[in-house]
């Protein structure tokens, strides 16, 4: 019998995963527990990294403590009460206070699943640590930016591309182990799938991140259109910036198309896995469509796919799944 999250963690999962909760719930029972638990722990590390009211060195120390605990390198009880008290969101506060519950469930995984989960969380935490170190001291008056495409690619892999690998390894171990698939191609598309979702977030959150002193678009690319990160604070520069921004929209779209190819490479009998992949891809594609209109530097307008629109996407995928050609046409296509 497949294992389920304890009730308290199941509630926390729903409260902290928002839209992604639907994806986790639809997963086959054989992998739902493992992936949901990995998500909760990644969400915990993300909450630590994002607690801006706490000094960077304290957050890095807390991440290191949690990393060691996840990897089984220490037995010290973790007390994140001080960090938890700084959280404005009650769910995130409880997530930190009850981190021990997630860690206890982690220790109950099978040896292979434990190794897979530890590997992906170690990579994710490395990305969060790098982010904190890179942007230490960043502010509205002192914007810090990535320097190159290589840095952007590395970041999107660490915080999201590696999740595609983890997801795939879990599916191959528990859901369709006998399926004859091109493993190398499957994993390549899985990584692009994750990178695409992260790049969508970066492009959507650009104005907000800039006001925190962070710019994830590389300076070498901005320099080619005679712009500096600081210039992106001013909507008047949108016309000069738009061609470069559009190229990143196209890049994110190409990654999501690879993700759609990944989805349809999975055996058609695995409807739950396919749906779990399709929903974030289609939500991401809809977000990109909306980002192509309007002033992308206008901080007063934050693009977000509404809950009714998410429900429409879910219903549409369920209705069209029995019709292979109709289902295939749901996916993103080059703009």
Image (cartoon, grey):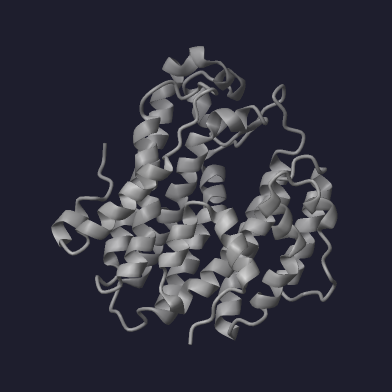
Q: Quadrant of residue 148?
A: top right
Identify whether 44 is placed above or below 291.
Answer: below
In this rendering, position of residue 143 left or right of residue 323: right
Q: Residue at x 46, y 67 (%)?
A: 167
* Front residue of this view, candidates 144 and 93: 93
Q: Residue at x 45, y 42 (%)?
A: 200
Q: Residue at x 51, y 16 (%)?
A: 235
In this rendering, position of residue 327 left or right of residue 199: left
* Front residue of this view, candidates 197 and 330: 330
Please provide percent x and percent y for residue 70. Answer: 70, 70
Identify whether 292 is placed above or below 263.
Answer: above
Please provide percent x and percent y for residue 314. Answer: 33, 54
Quadrant in the picture for the C terminus: top left
Q: Residue at x 57, y 48 (%)?
A: 155
* Front residue of this view, candidates 294 and 127: 294
Please provide percent x and percent y for residue 229. Answer: 59, 25
Identify whether 162 is placed above or below 131.
Answer: below
Residue 300: in sight, yes or no?
yes
Please provide percent x and percent y for residue 23. Answer: 43, 60
Identify whether 207 is placed above or below 37.
Answer: above
Residue 120: in sight, yes or no?
no
- View extreme (bottom): residue: 1
């Amino acid at each position: 019998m497949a294992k389920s999250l304890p009730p308290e963690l199941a509630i926390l999962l729903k409260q902290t995963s928002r839209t992604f909760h639907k994806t986790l719930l639809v997963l086959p029972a054989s992998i739902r527990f493992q992936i949901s638990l990995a998500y909760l722990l990644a969400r915990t590390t993300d909450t630590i990294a994002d607690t801006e009211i706490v000094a960077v060195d304290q957050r890095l120390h807390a991440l290191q403590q949690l990393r060691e605990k996840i990897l089984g390198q220490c037995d010290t009880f973790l007390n994140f009460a001080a960090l938890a008290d700084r959280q404005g969101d009650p769910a995130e506060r409880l997530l930190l206070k009850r981190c021990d519950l997630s860690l206890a469930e982690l220790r109950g995984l099978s040896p292979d699943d434990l190794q897979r989960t530890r590997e992906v969380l170690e990579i994710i935490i490395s990305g969060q640590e790098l982010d904190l170190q890179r942007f230490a001291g960043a502010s509205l008056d002192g914007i810090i930016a990535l320097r190159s495409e290589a840095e952007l690619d590395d970041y999107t892999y660490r915080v999201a591309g590696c999740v595609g690998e983890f997801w795939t390894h879990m599916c191959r171990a528990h859901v369709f182990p006998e399926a004859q698939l091109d493993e190398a191609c499957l994993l390549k598309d899985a990584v692009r799938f994750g990178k695409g979702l992260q790049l969508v977030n970066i492009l959507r959150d650009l104005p907000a991140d800039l006001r925190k002193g962070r710019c994830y678009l590389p300076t070498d690319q901005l320099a080619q259109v005679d712009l500096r990160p600081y210039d992106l604070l001013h909507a008047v520069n949108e016309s000069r910036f738009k061609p470069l921004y559009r190229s990143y929209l196209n890049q994110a779209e190409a990654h999501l198309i690879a993700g759609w190819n990944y989805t349809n490479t999975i055996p058609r009998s695995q409807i739950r896995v396919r749906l779990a992949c399709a929903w974030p891809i289609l939500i991401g594609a809809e977000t990109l469509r909306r980002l192509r209109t309007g002033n992308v530097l206008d901080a007063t307008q934050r693009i977000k796919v509404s809950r009714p629109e998410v429900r429409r996407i879910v219903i549409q995928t369920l209705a069209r799944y029995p019709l292979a050609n109709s289902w295939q046409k749901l996916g993103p296509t080059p703009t």
